[in-house]
Amino acid sequence: MTLWAAVLLACGLAYATKLAGYLVPPAWLAGRATARALGLLPVALLAALVGVQTFAAPGPSLVLDARVAGVAAAVVALVLRAPFLVVLVVAAAVAALVRAAGWAA
Amino acid sequence: MTTAPPLAPHRQRAVLRQALVVGLATGLYGVSFGALSVAAGLDFWQTMALSALLFSGGSQFAFVGVVAAGGAGSAAVATATLLGIRNGLYGVQMAGPLGVRGVRRLAAAQLTIDESTAVGIVQPEPSGRRLGFWATGLAVFACWNLMTAVGALVGDALGDTRRFGLDAMAAAAFLALLWPRLRGGEPWAVAVLAAAVAILCVPALPAGLPVITAAVVAVAVGTVRAGRASGRTAS
């Protein structure tokens, strides 16, 4: 699949998912197990993405590098209730500093 | 469409102000999406297509994250689509309050995301829910696309983005999206399990698949446990 095909397919599926919500009868989601599983899905996906984005390197392999310091700083910012953008800037700045100082790759 | 009493002027201003604040705040992190997307190897127009057509921040970050890791296009599509399922659930919730048909329903569907649903659903009166949804959806759409373009142009000019810690920013973006959902023991358990499974799968599976595998495992375990718990209460 070319990158453009993947982009457009993802866009089409995203819109179909959104529209489906307006077209299904409300009773369709009444089954509690389905609703529960679908409710947990974003948590599971986002947590998995955090793990992979923090530790994965080409290879594919696992590495400990400056990203870990950046993510740790992001956790501190989140605990201190910093807004979304501040969390991102803190993470990037700490990782960049750790690299500039030569403490980690 | 049912006719609801019109919104009082002071309530109208309050809802519009909320919509604008949410739109501006969301737009600001559109900059980071644009920069990460071009750093991942997407070009300017592919980046803009995601913001205008896919228009769901989490799915967009996930798509470019998988591409950046060297994952297949199909894995990027699958991860983005799974993460977008929640928008379908928001549609189920908003269909009643919005009462839209025809072209307006097609437009409402595209604007159905975390932010528009959140601002819409919390308004006490029916006309407030409608105004909150539409105003927030349109404000976020405008700001998100404008700032994505800025980010994509800046990101192109940055060169080696690791030097600026943009790879750590990608991980932090997912963490910040996850954080408000970690209320209670069950989400925490699912999150820890999913992260652990994904990390362990990294050396064994092609890029993109660890995330999907981990999500399926974590949701399956969560559902089985929930089923057992509700079975106990029922008996």
Image (cartoon, coloured by chain):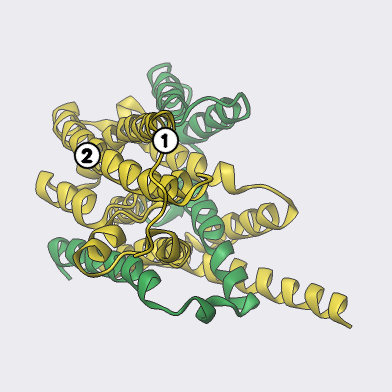
Chain colours: A green, B yellow
Front residue of A42/B231: it is B231
Which quadrant would the C terminus of chain B be assigned to in this image? bottom right
Task: Identify the amino acid type marked 1.
Answer: Ala
Instruction: Tell me the mark number nearer the camera, choosing from 2 and 1.
Output: 1
> On the same chain: label 2 and label 1?
yes
Question: For the residues marked 2 and 1, what is the alpha-carbon distance in whole angstroms?
Answer: 26 Å
N-terminal label among 2 and 1: 1
Q: For mark 1, name the chain.
A: B
Q: In this view, does A34 lie to the left or right of B65?
A: right
Q: In this view, does A2 lie to the left or right of B208?
A: left
Residue B104 in percent (x, y) is at 23, 61
Q: Is B195 in front, or is B145?
A: B145
Residue B134: x percent and y percent? 32, 48
Say the numbered circle drawn on residue B69.
Answer: none
Q: Give the x, y percent position of residue B199.
A: 54, 56
Residue wearing tag 1: B8
> How many labels sit on residues?
2
User: Is residue A84 something that shows in the picture?
Assistant: yes
SS type, badge 2: helix
* Disc marking residue B142: 2
Q: Residues within 10 Å of mark 2 (few under 14, many from 20)?
A: some
Q: Is mark 1 on a helix, strand or loop?
A: loop
Is B52 in front, or is B149? B52
**Residue A63 showing in the rendered view:** no
Above-or-below relation of B77 to B125: below
Location of residue B170 by image quarter: top left
Residue at position x 40%, y 40% in the image? B7
- Badge 1 density bin: few <14, some 14–19, many ≥20, Cα 10 Å: few
Left or right of B117, for residue A1: left
Q: Is residue A71 above or below residue B71?
A: above
